[in-house]
Image (cartoon, helix red, strand yellow):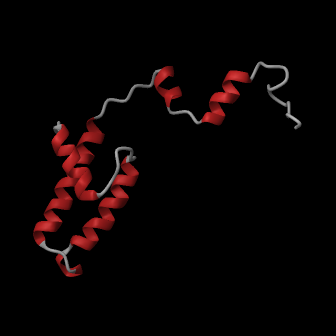
């Protein structure tokens, strides 16, 4: 498993933020590896750095243990879904009700 410093370096090399999906990381990697390839004006060293960053983040994501508990899933729910869930039984705001200004 990668260390915090290795993860930070890999993110820096690929230019991704703290929040990214594996699909986003893969897309950024593909863009960076094309630009870093010697045939595209890059260098072998640059290409190796980009590949190593991708490997670090990919292995971290593949080894991450997901939790499928209700709390964990709801933590990522949209505000709209949260409001629907909270007020679905409310007679004024529940299903089929519309609010007029």
Residue name at image x 22 percent, y 57 percent: 13
> Can you give x and y, in whole percent of width and height, for residue 83 in the image?
67, 29
- Which residue is farthest right? 100
Question: Could you tell me which quadrant the C terminus lies in?
Answer: top right
In the image, is residue 25 above or below residue 69?
Answer: below
Q: Is residue 98 visible?
A: yes
> Can you give x and y, in whole percent of width and height, for residue 82 in the image?
63, 29
Q: Is residue 54 visible?
A: no
- Give the left or right position of residue 25, taking residue 97 as reference: left
Residue name at image x 36 percent, y 48 percent: 22
> Can you give x and y, in whole percent of width and height, for residue 35 in the image?
26, 73
> Can you give x and y, in whole percent of width and height, for residue 25 in the image?
34, 53
- Which residue is farthest left? 45
Question: Looking at the image, how many numbered discs can be counted on the residues?
Answer: 0
- Give the left or right position of residue 83, taking residue 41 as reference: right
- Which residue is farthest front? 101
In the image, is residue 6 above or below residue 36?
Answer: above
- Give the left or right position of residue 90, taking residue 18 as reference: right
Residue name at image x 29 percent, y 40 percent: 62
In the image, is residue 24 above or below residue 5?
Answer: below
Residue name at image x 16 percent, y 42 percent: 5
- Give the left or right position of residue 74, taking residue 44 as reference: right
- The quadrant holding residue 27 is bottom left
Question: Could you tell me which quadrant the N terminus lies in?
Answer: top left
């Amino acid at each position: 498993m990668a260390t915090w410093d290795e993860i930070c370096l890999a993110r820096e090399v690929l230019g991704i933020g703290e929040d990214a999906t594996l699909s986003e990381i893969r897309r950024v990697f593909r863009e960076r590896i094309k630009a870093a390839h010697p045939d595209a004006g890059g260098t072998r060293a640059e290409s190796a750095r980009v590949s190593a960053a991708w490997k670090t983040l990919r292995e971290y994501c593949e080894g991450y243990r997901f939790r499928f508990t209700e709390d964990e899933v709801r933590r990522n729910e949209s505000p709209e879904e949260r409001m629907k869930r909270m007020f679905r039984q409310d007679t004024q705001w529940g299903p089929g009700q519309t609010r007029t200004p």
